[in-house]
Image: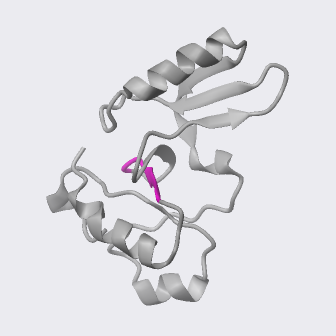
Amino acid sequence: GNYAPTILLVDTAKKEKLDGLIFADNSGTEVRETNASAVLFVKHGNPPKIIVPSTQHGDILSSITVKAILKISQGLGYDVEVRDVKIEELGEEVRVYRNDAITLKEIAAMAPDRMVISPGPCAPAQAGKS
């Protein structure tokens, strides 16, 4: 993908002392990856489950590290799922705004605990401001 629109966001996140960013798909409804790496989720249970966002949409790259983790996890008896992961599954209230339909002042007034930012939709020319 084209990560150029996210450079300022990553810099802002660091200044705000955030641990990182989770990027969503173009619709803002599905988890894709983080600013630093692929993302995976662990669901506790018997057996535990590893969940990884699908790469089938072509907007994130397949990760050699994730493939290795999945193989090792299966060997240790974990269930493994590669599928679309909805943002709602993160367990928080979700509000979606197109990035050119809300100002930074309006976002600040909401005082969000966390933000998920999608650099889409489409090519950078159609993406608005990220």
On screen, residue 5 above or below 102: above
**Magenta highlight range:** 21-26
On screen, residue 104 above or below 19: below
In this picture, residue 39 sits left or right of residue 119 = right
- Which colour style is shown? one colour
On screen, residue 87 above or below 12: above
Q: Position of residue 103 (x, y in %)?
A: 40, 84
In this picture, residue 125 sits left or right of residue 75 = left
In the image, farthest residue toward the right:
46
- Residue 123 seen in the figure: yes
Magenta region includes residue 59: no
For the point 47% across and 27% down, which residue is it?
66
Q: How many marks?
A: 0
On screen, residue 30 above or below 79: below
Q: Nearer the viewer, residue 52 or 109?
A: 52
Q: Position of residue 85 (x, y in %)?
A: 56, 38
In this picture, residue 51 sits left or right of residue 29 = right
Locate the C terminus and report the quarter of the image it occupies. bottom left
Q: Tell me which corner region of the image, top left, top right, bottom left or bottom right, holds residue 5.
A: bottom left
For the point 63% across and 72% down, which residue is it?
113
Q: Position of residue 96 (x, y in %)?
A: 50, 63
Q: Nearer the viewer, residue 30 or 72?
A: 72
Q: Position of residue 53 (x, y in %)?
A: 50, 33
- Residue 99 seen in the figure: no
Locate the N terminus and report the quarter of the image it occupies. top left
Q: Nearer the viewer, residue 110 or 43?
A: 43
In the image, farthest residue toward the top:
75
For the point 50% across and 45% down, which residue is it?
31
